[in-house]
Image (cartoon, rainbow, N blue to C red):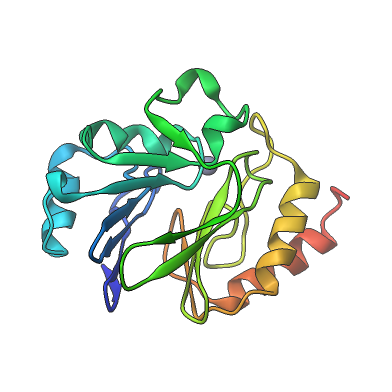
Amino acid sequence: MWKKDIIYFFSPKGPQLDSNTIIVDDEITLLVDPGTSSRSYLKRILGETGNSLEEVDIVLNTHGHYDHFQGNTYFPEAEKIAFYPDSEDISEETSEDIRAIKKESVLSTGKLDFRILHTPGHSMGSCCLYLPGEVLVCGDLVLAEGSFGRVDLKGGSFDELKRSIKRLCDLDFEHLLPGHGGVGNKNSVRRALSFVERSGFQ
Ligand SMILES: [Zn+2]
């Protein structure tokens, strides 16, 4: 587990099929990407932040791939939000109780104000959570070592991915919290940009 103040980052052990989970233990308890984990895993990591499953107020999905949203079902009472239900990412698999974020906005958890940025590419409805000067939660857009999410699934676009990665380069943050693998930083994003700019896709 990685932690900065009230922001917790959990990376599941074993083969990296399951997504990372981020928990913000603020006045509002926010959980990003419950993954496909078991109820007991989610209960345990929430316990490490001093919360229970029932205490999660908001579940945000960075995008509509099942390895990020399947665990939503363990939070029947929480408000679920995401950009993707409004796009065509994988509409048939998305649960109906997800509220679509229609435009970029600020999500306040109490002490912290996160900006929700729409960053398509890996999928149409991918989004990032940005706490200026501190943290960027980026889903599968960029990974710590500088690789980037695949674009060959439904709704993926290399041009959009490139544009979104460029945008991340202009943001000010210390820690990059991706959807898989470990924690990165600004260099992860710079490296990803140089990869996409050199790649033959363009
Ligand atoms: Zn994905």
> Who's the residue at 54% across and 78% down the image?
173
Q: Is residue 171 left or right of residue 41?
A: right
At 60% from the left edge and 40% from the top edge, which residue is drawn?
Answer: 125
Q: Position of residue 51 (x, y in %)?
A: 13, 57
Task: Give the side of residue 103 with respect to residue 9, left or right.
Answer: right
Q: Residue 44, image x and y in percent?
A: 12, 52
Q: Above or below — where is 172 with respect to 24?
A: below
The residue sitting at the top extreme is 92
Give the image location of residue 59, x and y in percent: 33, 45
Is 174 displayed left or right of 17 in the figure?
right
Q: Residue at x 19, y 47 (%)?
A: 42
| Nearer to the camera, 44 or 94 | 94
Reply above or below: 134 against 161.
Answer: below
Name the image quarter holding residue 6. bottom left
Q: Is residue 192 visible?
A: no
Residue 18 image offset from top left, x and y in percent: 37, 44
The residue nearer to you, when weighing 129 against 162, is 129
